[in-house]
Amino acid sequence: MKVAKFGGSSVADANMLRQVSNIIKSDNDRKFIVVSAPGKRFSDDVKVTDLFIQLGNQYNSGQSYEQTLESISERFLSITDDLGLSPDIVTRIKNEASRLLKETTNTWQQMDSLKAMGEDSLARVLSAYLNKIGLHATYVNPKEAGIIVSNEPGGAQILEKSYQQIYHLREREGILVIPGFYGYTESGVLTTFPRGGSDITGSIIAAGVQAELYENFTDVSSVYCVNPQMVKNPKEITTLTYKEMRELSYAGFSVFHDEALIPAFRKNIPVCIKNTNEPNKKGTMIVANKEDNGQPVVGIAGDKGFSSIYVSKYLMNREIGFGKNLLDILVEENISFEHAPSGIDDMSVIVRSSQLTPEKEELLVNRIKNELQVDTITIIHGLAMIMLVGEGMSNRLNVAAKATKAFSEAVVNIDMINQGSSEVSMMFGIHEESLTAAVQSLYREFFL
Ligand code: ASP
């Protein structure tokens, strides 16, 4: 039994849904189908989920919202018309959205219920179409499927007890079409996962039914070893481990939601990233273990938007609790940190710049100066992090030497180097304007 999840671009219009249905039909093992809401049909199109968010915001700020509801209805109507299905779903969307807007007083709950309507409606449409072409398919609501989540609107987490109930889906007849992106709290309140969370639903269902494979259909034929916007026609990755995928998605590989790896990883379900438009291509497999093919680095990721809080204090190494006290200040100011490389008398804490405002920075500088009595404190902005990722780096000589050679060939100064003892990745902090040049040089060094 396989779980196949189709992302927003794969279900964006009627033609894509025909293609999706062919994919489902071509393999009897594809029993559990998880869908996103219709995504963009062209580059400046709007995703249906964004339309639903706009609808809620317009209503709650007293603006006119009717046009947005009309645009959502038209998107679905063009799909049902083209597929020769009844337009019932459009009436349902209009009635249900109006009811939610007028009757739900809790704006978080209202917003989550609106956001979920994109996937919910699409799952109903796809299930109807599969029946029309002669397959036996049933729409299954996440509550019925057993997806029980924490009470965190827009950021739900799956509760462990869900898996037992999900397992029983195996006993159901035919193909089950499940909307992605949301579940229900223990008290029955609809709550969504973070944005892009249909991947998470797919992974939860795959883990729950103990699928032989979780196929994640998207709009690329594989995961590339480097961002194709930085390097032309980069090499495709055929197999990755969960750990490698996690490290790569941390720094800019957005092909698979990072939270979606956890359920599959815990239950050891292999994941395959495939292209809806080229379903016969092998795609990229994500697995627990892979054979060492002699290549130390599988991918190079890079992301901008980091800042470093640099502090120095003479004899820091002998001061018990210095690091803890510094991080405690960040906790109290509600800032999460990414890395904390340290020297003998100094320490840098790398944070995402989006968490800092000029006021927050001033507060941090004052608190760190006064409470920790440091000699210097500097906040540096505009940093990029580059990650070299590969389990094959472990115990292999020369990786760091090759990397630093690539940086020097691109004439890029390294501000920071960090490598954990797991040796799955090596991280370099540089100034963001040099990101592309550095990544290109590393690609030449490790892949050409
Ligand atoms: N439709 C949701 C979003 O746009 C979830 C998803 O597509 O995975 O974020």
Image: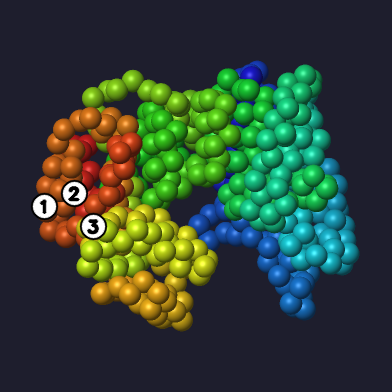
Task: Give the amino acid at mark 1.
Answer: Glu
Residue 217 visible? The answer is no
Task: Give the amino acid at mark 2.
Answer: Ser
Label pair 2/1, CB-CB below 8 angstroms: yes
Quadrant of the image containing the N terminus: top right
Task: Give the amino acid at mark 3.
Answer: Gly
Residue 166 in the figure: left or right of residue 337: right
Distance from label 3 to label 1 (Cα)? 27 Å
Number of the label disc, if any, that sits on residue 409: 1
Q: Is residue 195 above or below residue 282?
A: below
Residue 288 in the figure: left or right of residue 343: right
Residue 133 at x, y percent in the picture: 74, 27
Count numbered badges in the picture: 3
Distance from label 2 to label 3 (Cα)? 28 Å
Indicate which disc, 3 or 1, sits on the residue closer to the N terminus: 3
The residue positioned 40% from the left and 74% from the top of the image is 371
Q: Which residue is mark 3?
A: 343
Q: Is residue 389 above or below residue 286?
A: below
Number of the label disc, if any, that sits on residue 441: 2
Q: Secondary structure at mark 1?
A: helix
Which image quadrant is residue 146 in? top right
Indicate which disc, 2 or 1, sits on the residue closer to the N terminus: 1
Distance from label 2 to label 1 (Cα)? 7 Å
